[in-house]
Amino acid sequence: MKKFFGSFVFISLLVFGVYFLEKGKLGAASFVSFISVVLISGFAFYGFDRIKELDIKNLRLILSEIKETKAEIFAKQDDLKKTAFVMSEILAFSSADNGRMDSKEGYRIKREWYDHKLNELMNDFDFSDKEIQEIKKFSAKYNEIDRLLQDRDVLKVSDPDYKEIKTKLESLSSEIKRMQQEDTKKDR
């Protein structure tokens, strides 16, 4: 029924347009505009079942609302990326610190899992190399600790390089605390 009505309205308006053009009541430019609106309306009513109402007057308002919504979405995207950055930093730190007292195998598995998840998150948000370096700064420090300890489970007083390793570990620990304090003071 709707398609019949759309076709009827389209043909009727087309006939009236041609009639008014012939009688000189409608100029050529007005006729072209009138026929354009009739064609668009006819196709809309005939072809699109979802259209219940055609509101040409408010079309401009709707387009401006779409532009505003688009701007809001891009603003929220920046906020989301900032949040993801902070979450990535937390994940990187947790992955470096979590499980240090576990067995070597358990610690290695946890680190691999955390690193995998962190890389997925960073890839999803397309972080720059500088941002990735900032995110992984704590992991880098904990990797230095792992290199210092090498294959040892613990550092023993009886180890020949005990004093040297202990001094380096204390220095790294102080550096990690300083980095955390600086991060706390940063405003993103």
Image (cartoon, rainbow, N blue to C red):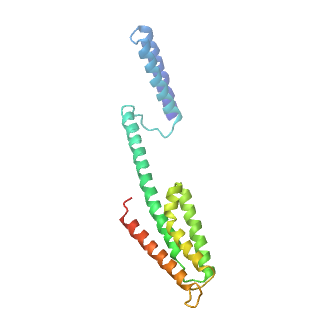
Residue 162 higher or lower than 17, as above or below? below
In this rendering, is residue 19 above or below 145? above
User: Residue 34 at what x, y percent from top left?
Assistant: 43, 20
Report whether residue 1 is seen. Answer: no
Query: Residue 73 at x, y = what percent?
Result: 43, 49
The answer, for residue 116, to whether it is visible in the render is: yes
Name the residue rendered at 52%, 32% in the picture.
46
Name the side, left or right, on which 57 lies relative to 121. left
What number of labels is visible? 0
Residue at point 42%, 73% (across, down) = 177
Q: Give the residue at the far bottom of this rendering.
A: 158
Foreground residue among 74 and 164: 164
- The part of the image, by quadrant, that contains residue 156 is bottom right
The C terminus, quarter of image: bottom left
For image coordinates 41% across by 52% down, the residue present is 76
Q: Who's the residue at 40% across and 37% down the image?
A: 63
Instruction: Find residue 92 and report its horizontal and vertical position in percent.
Output: 51, 68
Q: Nearer the viewer, residue 112 or 20?
A: 112
Q: Nearer the viewer, residue 3 or 54?
A: 54
How far across and how far down the image is residue 171, in percent? Answer: 47, 76
